[in-house]
Amino acid sequence: MPGCLGLDALWQMVGFFLGWSGGGGSAARALGLGELKLAGQVMPNVRKIVYNVDIKRVMRLKLWLGIADGWLSADGEIIYRAKDLRWGS
């Protein structure tokens, strides 16, 4: 699985949280991130993938904006770390 798909999944989780909270909408999208570290790859032999996001901040003004840190683990080893994932609408 390319690293961009894992990163997109983390962004999608932040967007899902905003939608669940009442924000978001059809114009919602990924707005960037602060830092990304990739320490491995998701290969076909990986049996379990876990995604996690820690919501740090949600702003509900004219623009809905969610900021979170996230990670992806493959078979119990964290291989992607993303800081300050931003999603908004």
Image (spheres, helix red, strand yellow):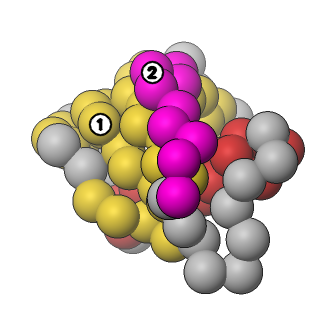
Query: Would you call the spot at circle 1 few (<14 residues within 10 Å), some (14-19), or many (20 or more)?
Result: some
Dominant SS type (magenta): strand
Would you place residue 83 above or below residue 9 in this image? above
Disc 2 and disc 1 in contact, CB within 8 angstroms: yes
**Residue type at the position of mark 2:** Lys
* Count of marks overlaid on the render: 2
Which residue is the site of mark 1? 84
Coordinates of residue 85 in the picture (x, y in percent): 36, 44
Tell me the tag on residue 56. 2
The magenta stretch spans residue 46: no
Tell me the tag on residue 44. none
- Marks 2 and 1, how far apart in space? 8 Å
- Quarter in which the C terminus is drawn: bottom right
From the viewer's side, name the closer residue of 20 and 60.
60
Assign a secondary structure to mark 1.
strand
Q: Residue at x 46, y 26 (%)?
A: 57
Would you place residue 44 above or below residue 26 in this image? above
Query: Would you call the spot at circle 2 few (<14 residues within 10 Å), some (14-19), or many (20 or more)?
Result: few
From the viewer's side, name the closer residue of 24 and 69.
24
Would you place residue 79 above or below residue 23 in this image? above
Coordinates of residue 21 in the picture (x, y in percent): 79, 39
Coordinates of residue 12 in the picture (x, y in percent): 61, 57
